[in-house]
Amino acid sequence: MDSFELDIPKAVDEIKKANAKLVCVQLPDGLKPRAKEIQEALEKETGAQILIWLGSCFGACDYAYQAKYIGVDLLIQWGHNPWIKPF
């Protein structure tokens, strides 16, 4: 197991703050093996439906903008640096 801190509590807070019911999580390839763990933790703590984006993720400029077309309330992208952009 790597030492990367996922900061699930921060994601939970953001989902609750947005009152999001459908959330898309975008992960870099290195974190995709932990997708199920992330999905289960977020669903348990928020009651929101969590979708995992399986497309590319090469940084903040490569966000899954297509998620808005399926009615996602919130997009959470894990990466190396914080970056917030409202939908």
Image (cartoon, rainbow, N blue to C red):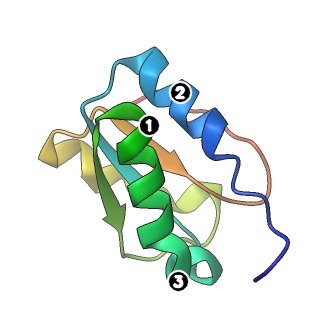
- Image quarter where the N terminus lies is bottom right
The location of residue 54, given as percent across then percent down, is 36, 75
Q: Residue at x 54, y 75 (%)?
A: 34
Amino acid type, mark 3? Pro
At label 2, which amino acid type do we have?
A: Glu
Task: Provide the secondary structure element on which disc 2 rests.
Answer: helix
The residue tagged 1 is 45
Left or right of 6? Residue 5 is right
Q: Is residue 69 above or below residue 55?
A: above
| Nearest-to-viewer mark from 1 and 3 | 1
* Amino acid at pointer 1: Glu
First-in-chain label (2 vs 1): 2
Which residue is under mark 3?
A: 33
Looking at this view, is 81 or 60 the one in front?
A: 81
* Residue 52: image location, x then y, percent: 35, 64
Identity of the residue drawn at 64% across and 37% down: 9
What's the residue at 48%, 16% (across, down)? 17
Q: Can you tell which quarter of the image residue 64 is in? A: bottom left
| Residue in front for this viewpoint, 82 or 15 | 15
**Label 2 sits on residue:** 14
Spatial CA span between label 1 and label 3: 20 Å
Mark 1 element type = helix
Considering every residue shown, the one lying at the far left of the view is 70
Q: Nearer the viewer, mark 2 or mark 1?
A: 1
Secondary structure beneath disc 3?
Answer: helix
Q: Are marks 2 and 1 in contact (CB under 8 Å)?
A: no
* Left or right: residue 69 compared with residue 72: left
Whole-percent x and y of residue 8? 62, 46
Q: Position of residue 63 (x, y in %)?
A: 48, 56
Q: Earlier in the sequence, mark 1 or mark 3?
A: 3
